Amino acid sequence: MEAIDSGRLKYTDQIPCSENASSMGGSQIWLDTKETLSVDEMLKAICVVSANDCTVAMAEYLAGSEENFVKQMNERAKELGMNDTTFKNCHGIDEDGHVSSAYDIALMSRELLEKHPDIKKYTTIYMDSLRDGKSQLVNTNKLIRNYRGATGLKTGSTSLALYNLSASATRDGLSLIAVIMKAPTTKDRFAEATKLLDYGFANYSFKSFAQKGDTVKEIPVSKGTISSVSAILANNAGVVLKKGEENNIVQNVNLPDSISAPIKEGDKLGEISYSQNNETIATIDIVAKNSVDKIDFPNMIKYVFKSWISN
């Protein structure tokens, strides 16, 4: 998804299948070395039926080899703070030293869902097909069909790891992730994930205060080519709260009364914070909506000329 969002990969790109990819065991769609599938089709197979052959084919296409891709996976895991994780392959089939934790899986899941929300177009598919309808796909994540608000995310099972699941769902603006590892049966992993998600939705809510780009204030600008600049929120303002505590929130806006030019678009002008019981629960930067040049001699002439014309 990072490759797609950066423009390095397109959904329409055709992915070949190597002997290595076609020889994968476990969950697969029986890729043939003579066929290619689009990235869109590969993602369907990976997200819906955990196709190991497609996972390897994509890894080889993106990094030249599975080994190179696994190296990139481990580097990215470290960047995300996944300190209990070491990847030995790209498909998750049992291998010595291939380990992770529930916390790390949650970190990875959150990064994927927050930064690359288009993945949900695939993780929310319950049934689909490939190869002109010849290959039927049914999602291994049964919560997609049975749990209200389910957005994904991924199942996984091996003889050693047993039955695992990263389950995600969104209701009333609140998004939750529940990670189940080493469940004895597939039924257990879905039941336990349901309990965790139900607990979260029953006890917590998401309180939205404002949206990214909302104007907080017009700030006067001295020595600028225009007289004021819009101070806007750099990000959405919201927080997860225990139910029943949504109303006793105090807002504090920290902005200067005026500012001197020059100002660049996106420059930080101040902060807005939200607190509960004297404890800060969220802080969002306030930034300049647009640039304001400082009045120098050439700009002064333009400014005077524009004022004269407009009058």
Image (cartoon, grey):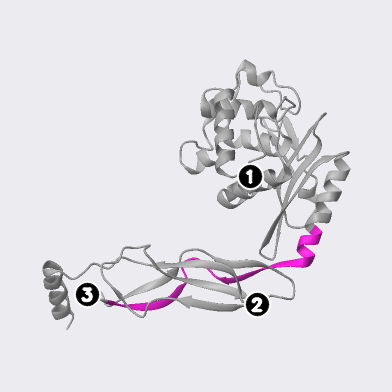
Image quarter in which the N terminus is found? top right
Instruction: State which tag comes first along the sequence, 3 or 1.
Output: 1
Residue placed under numbered mark 2 in the picture = 277
Q: CA distance from mark 3 to mark 1?
A: 47 Å
Secondary structure under tag 3 reads: loop
Q: Which residues are magenta?
A: 198-221
Secondary structure under tag 1 reads: helix
Q: Amino acid at mark 3?
A: Lys
Q: Nearer the viewer, mark 1 or mark 2?
A: 2
> Which disc, if any, is residue 108?
1
At 13% from the left and 77% from the top, the residue drawn is: 304
At 55% from the left and 78% from the top, the residue drawn is: 251
Percent across and percent down for residue 307 are 17, 79
Question: Depth check: 284 or 59 in front?
Answer: 284
Q: CA distance from mark 2 to mark 3?
A: 41 Å
Q: CA distance from mark 1 to mark 2?
A: 32 Å
